[in-house]
Amino acid sequence: MLEVFVFATLNGLVTGLLLFMLASGLTLIFSMMGVLNFAHASFYMLGAYFAYSISLKTGFWVGLIFAPLLVGVLGALVERYGLRRVHRSGHVAELVFTFGLAFLIDEAVQFFWGADTKNYRSPDILDFPLFTMFGQEFPAYRGFMIGISVMIFIALYYVLTKSRVGIIIQAAITHPNTVANLGHNVPLIFMGVFGVGTALAGLAGVIAGPVLTTFPGMALVLGSIVFVIVVIGGLGSLPGALIASLLVGLLQSYAIASDVGMPELLELIGVSFDRNHPLNDLWTLSLPQIAPILPYLLLVLVLIFRPAGLLGKREE
Amino acid sequence: MSILTLNNISKSFGQTEIIRGVNLAIEDGEKHAIIGPNGAGKSTLFHLISGLHTVTGGSIKFKDQEIQNRPAFEINRLGLARSFQVTNIFHRMSVFENVRCALLWSKGFRYSFWHLLGRQGELNDASMHVLEEIGLSDRAQYPAGELAYAAQRALELGIAIASGADLIMLDEPVAGMNISEAQSAVELIRKVTSGKTLIMVEHDMNIVFDIADRISVLVYGEIIATDVPEKIRANPRVQEAYLGEVPNSA
Amino acid sequence: METLKAIAKKSPIWIAYLAALLGLPLVFDSILAISIFNQMAIGIVFALSYNMLLGQGGMLSFGHAVYFGLGGFLAVHTLILIEFETVYFSIIFIPVIGGVIGLLAAIFIGSFSTRKAGTVFAMISLGIGELIAASSLIFSDFFGGEAGISGDRTYGPTFFGVDFTQNDQIYYVAAIWVFIATLFMYLFTQTPAGRMANAVRDNPERAQFIGYSSRRIRFISFCASGLFAGIAGGLFALNYEFITEENLNAATSGRVLLMAYIGGLGYFIGPIIGAVVLTLMNSLLSNYTELWMLYLGIMFLLTVIYLPRGFAGFIMMHQVAWINNRIKSLGVPYLLIGLPSLVLLAGIIAMVEMSDHEGEAFYYFGFKLNPESFVTWAVVLVISLSAYAGVRAALPQLKQAWESANAVPDSEDPKS
């Protein structure tokens, strides 16, 4: 039992930190510009694909550095030439734009790389078990994932709170007009933040690609979950996004790992159902089966009862 | 008889107190102006009365009913209408549609999805009548967002008065207008509010002294004086707190 | 009711619409054409229902397929019930079932999701959509799991001897339903609730100050759009006799968003245009190129950036020029910019297709293009660049003609 718990926690941590890498970029972009970037997971996918292509020629580590940069530059260009123009048509148009962008990136990836799954592999150097517990191995690559994520977040934290640029960004998050009036080039900041946000997503793709498989549907797999996280954590709150990411990551991990089914739970309270009962489907659910729905259920509940999310700040 | 009474109204946003203990009684049929320096809380006071914000303390009575903290649409249905400082019209609909929508509730249509508006002769006639009153009948079919600024302000006024409200609140109705536009606007305001109660926030002292029966002066969220125009002009506290554009011809 | 029919009969547009709907299969009677018309019919009702929400009401939903799908699932189940004679009525009433289910679902979901519009609403709709799509895979008894469920429309009482085994027979049923649905959705926009939906879209704050609860208006629009989406789902069930979880999910919701947006939001005819264009692209274009989805994506994105009001919006942009009687002055400028634009487009598509064809020659509008040939590439590139130059050159005079055609007269009346 303990080993299941330990590994589930570790895996949940890996997933949660990865989700936060995506959610943090999304939150930054939303806080700054009021745009919920539907295409965020698509940039994550681009990161994986860019890294894959680069790694074919020069290996994993070069890809790790350059792929996120490429994605960030692409993101900045999208902001400058696409999003900025759509901005004056209102929030709905912005959302629709990012939605169309997601669709386009999806198709473009299939155009340039084909529809098959790519054999993007983690570097051989990390291909050993980090430790073994109760007969199960924990791969070093996953440890690497945790390590990189934590390093990035510490860097992000310091930049946002201690550096001049970071403080300007924090101010521009809640009071963009005031910051512009103080003489700062807010459009440039916007472009920069969008670029950094997408670069973070790309980085997540670079390190997740080998583990979660690199294929054209990978954006869809994570896309909705990231939105759920950002909303649950509170639109516009980084600490909230962190808590929500870890929550969702761990929740899913525990749900999948445990094999508890509804019948067992119900038996605990002395209720049992016969097979032909019309709600049989519902009552024979097991936790692993409903694991994919849990985040959405949480999303809907939070939006109904606490539209500002757990720690939300930005008012619509 | 007092149509609107404010009893010890206060409003805070978080730690910041914007309105501190405002007491005011507006008489039925009175033309009342609220003046004060920028940031005094005039618009906030309007928001509190019209239902956009909740009060932190105190009560507001309109026609003997308590209206504080009630939703804006309920307050509007009791007969209170307002305009906005920043033009707030239905910019994608035509000028005619703007006014017609403003008339819908008072004509009893409620949430009907079975009445065809094209066949509602009385409603359409009433809409054209309002348009004529505000001088926009020649531009009835234009999208409201395409009108010139002064025309939009006139439409703003039209939407506010269309439903036949008894109390009309206008927030800086002539802001941004040149002298001749402002004069026309004042004429219009006088015409459409005759017989009704009017509360107006305004900075232009000429207009204020022209229209108002009484003036209240709001400074830092408190009313420091409420009186007829001549007495307000002579009031030393007012002169001290707010050196407005007092007309040269005293 | 009589007066409604009288109005409808008086208006020539509606008669033309009905004639077109009924007459299409007479002009194009191939099996492919009938199948395309059936798809268009479903798409038109679905997209129009979506427009009630987004274009008329300003509510962006990423989960509209739920009402379509639920309507469709209940419709197929009803077909099965008719087959086993548990209930017995003509299948032409199946869309009613779809509509009722769509309405009930919308009433339930709308009761908590229409409190706010904007991003919160969009997120709730996404969450609900995903929740229901995911749940449908779990409740496999009702939803048939990944394989979906299927039925047979040839059971039940025949309608004047017709048993609907053929696709063109079912098309006429669909055509009548499309007409009825379009008519009622149009009439809705002419009612107080429909007009106030526009007002709430433009300015939810101001709507309150003319006596209306914005939330209640949104709720009514939401329920109405669910009703008609359910009808579209019923039409889908009748046409395909088969429905799966895919018809409930985010992809289908995305497709209807695309249709409505490209056609043009906020204009009644927009979604009709969008449904027709997208169905044609889907059916016809996919025969000529594998890349049609890519083109669709690019077209969509360009529409969002440059033509935010869609095709219908583009047409309606000329409204002021029409009122001013200066439409004709735009004819030549449009021609001067239109021709090079088309050539430029053809050139770009040629280059994209050549990259995709990887070495094999193929036919492109009658020309044989060989991606291996340097000459071919050079020619296409030169043509494209000159076309681009032509577009840039024609732009200023178009701008000028546009501005002069669009001047809004300001009244000289001092009373204004």
Image (spheres, coloured by chain):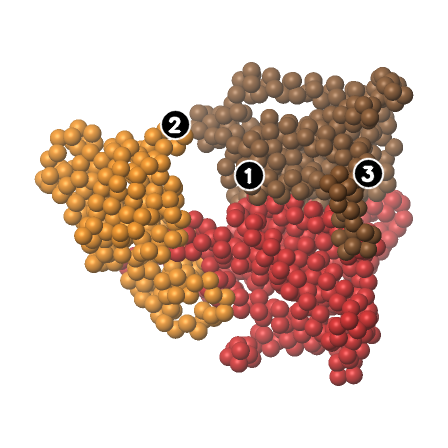
Chain colours: A brown, B orange, C red
Nearest the viewer among B220 and A280 is: A280
Earlier in the chain: of badge 1 and badge 3, it is 3
Nearest the viewer among C78 and B53 is: C78
Q: Amino acid at mark 2?
A: Gln
Query: Which residue has dot 1 on it?
Result: A306
Residue A165, image x, y percentages:
55, 20
Asked whether disc 1 touches disc 2, contact meaning CB atoms under 8 Å apart, the reply is: no
Q: Residue at x 77, y 71 (%)?
A: C86
Residue A215, image x, y percentages:
82, 38
Q: Is residue C185 visible?
A: yes
Report whether B107 appears left or right of B183: right
Q: Amino acid at mark 3?
A: Phe
Query: Which residue has dot 3 on it?
Result: A215
Q: Amino acid at mark 1?
A: Arg
Neighbour tally class for label 2: few under 14, some 14-19, many 20 plus, Cα within 10 Å? few
Residue B15 bears which disc, if any? 2
